[in-house]
Image (tube, rainbow, N blue to C red):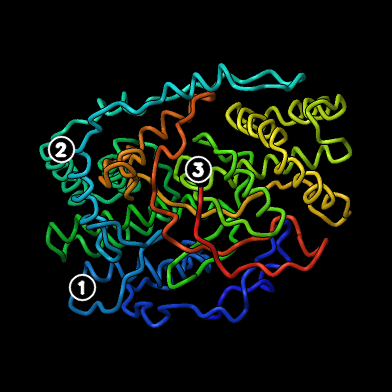
Amino acid sequence: MKTPCKDLYKDIKGIAFSCADNKEVKNESTIPQTVYMLPDKLLSALDWQKRDSLRWTNVFGPRISGIVDPETSAGARFEIFPGVAVRDFTPGQSQYQKFLQILELRKKRALNRWDTRRVSRLSANLYWPWQHVERPHITALNPGLLYGWYPTEDNENHDKTWREIKELVTGELTMPSIRSILELVHSEWGKTLRTNFDLKYLTLAAEILKIESQKIESEALLSLIFELESFAHYSSITNRHTEIYTGTFEGLWVEVVEASIQTIRATELCQTERLFDELINLCEGRTAPVILNEYGSIADGNHRFTAVWLWNLLSATRDCCWSIGDDQFQRSIGEFLRRKKAQISPVTVHEILRHLALILQNREQGEKLREYLKPRFNNNRIQYQIENLPAVFISTYNNVAAIAEIYDRDGDIVRFEPGIYEALLSLNSKVLPERACYHFADRVPLPWFDLVNTEATEPHKSPESMRNGD
């Protein structure tokens, strides 16, 4: 397989891929060859796309083959991104095995409440010099309060769920029953019913279960259902976005899609230094995909996302003097945010203006903003407004997401419950502290993208890949 290169993406509007053509793809030989075969007639009926085929051939087909016929299955089984080992969670294990380990993690509780009071205090007392923008009042969603939703003993509930699933599988496999089966599995992972399976993946799950439910033992059948649910849920989410790249990168399976900044939800506060660095990276054509979860919220890349909104604001005020004391600058900021009111959340408004004030107050950063970044906007080929970002999806419900504060302090993994992200969906002015949740996504290299056409101003040789930073 040829490595991703810039030429493949030159026709994608707004996104140019920055990756060296001679980059060697690692572990190419580990792509598994034993795949659960799907009839051509079924694939035709499902309107199977190329990326569906690649995903099935390289990830889920081998995993399912290893469950229904373990003796003939060979080769490594790729995990959907991030695909890295976190302690005892290793790539290649089945979704059901991972689920049993997450049951153990769920029994761990934070012994002390997270210090989220500082968020409200920050919002109330921060430096806010903006005359034409009302300061959003941001408060913290205290995740510690949500842990009372989950019982500490899950075995009895798990057995009951399995009995319900078994009854459904042994009955007539209709679309409603298939949906119920997958929803039951999904709810066991994350105690949530926010599922939205596309019909073609439900159809595929039904066809496989009709064939295999009479042939394999109960434990293998449960493993099969968990794999089918993972495939259906992940594919349904990912395929609703425009594909940028599907394949291996640095020996891992990755699918990069295009996501509108209007639909992405910021979840955490930013740090000024890291936000400024991401703004400069953006200017230099060095932006990694943001990592989104099933709620459309940022799992990793909050600083990159906020930097894009700050870029858009600065480009809209490029004819002004970037100074807090400049009246035209003040008015232009107010006008920009009024136009974008329906597209930008109070949390993002809070963060871009809070940190812009701090950047302009900092002599070194303020000078670099005016002397290095501002001239870029004078070139009529530069992309003034960025509407879309490259994104990679990672499901919170069936992946290891840890409370960052506890992991940083003790190295201990206490599960960050998916229900916390679900609660944030209906709380427009709620936010989590910095680095509230750690998805371990920064352990995986991702390609850099040029979102602003840096070659229009000056040649720039981008590195081949980067480690994710939030």
Q: Of the residues tagged 1 and 2, which is closer to the observer?
A: 2
Q: Separation of disc 1 and disc 3 at Cα?
A: 37 Å
Question: Residue 382's image quarter?
Answer: bottom right
399, 243: nearer the viewer: 399
What residue does disc 2 label? 154
Mark 3 residue crowding within 10 angstroms, few (<14) / some (14–19) / many (20+): many
Mark 1 residue crowding within 10 angstroms, few (<14) / some (14–19) / many (20+): few
- Tell whether label 2 touches label 3 (CB within 8 Å): no
In the drawing, does residue 233 fall left or right of residue 123? left
8, 371: nearer the viewer: 371
Residue drawn 34% across the image and 44% down it: 408
Mark 2 residue crowding within 10 angstroms, few (<14) / some (14–19) / many (20+): some
Residue drawn 20% across the image and 56% down it: 97
Percent across and percent down for residue 300 are 48, 47
Residue drawn 20% across the image and 38% down it: 108
* Residue type beneath disc 2: Asp
Picture disc at residue 298: 3
SS for dot 2: loop
In the drawing, does residue 275 fall left or right of residue 439? right
Q: Of the residues tagged 1 and 3, which is closer to the observer?
A: 3
What residue does disc 1 label? 69
Question: Residue 465's image quarter?
Answer: bottom right
Does residue 229 lie above or below 402 as drawn? Answer: below
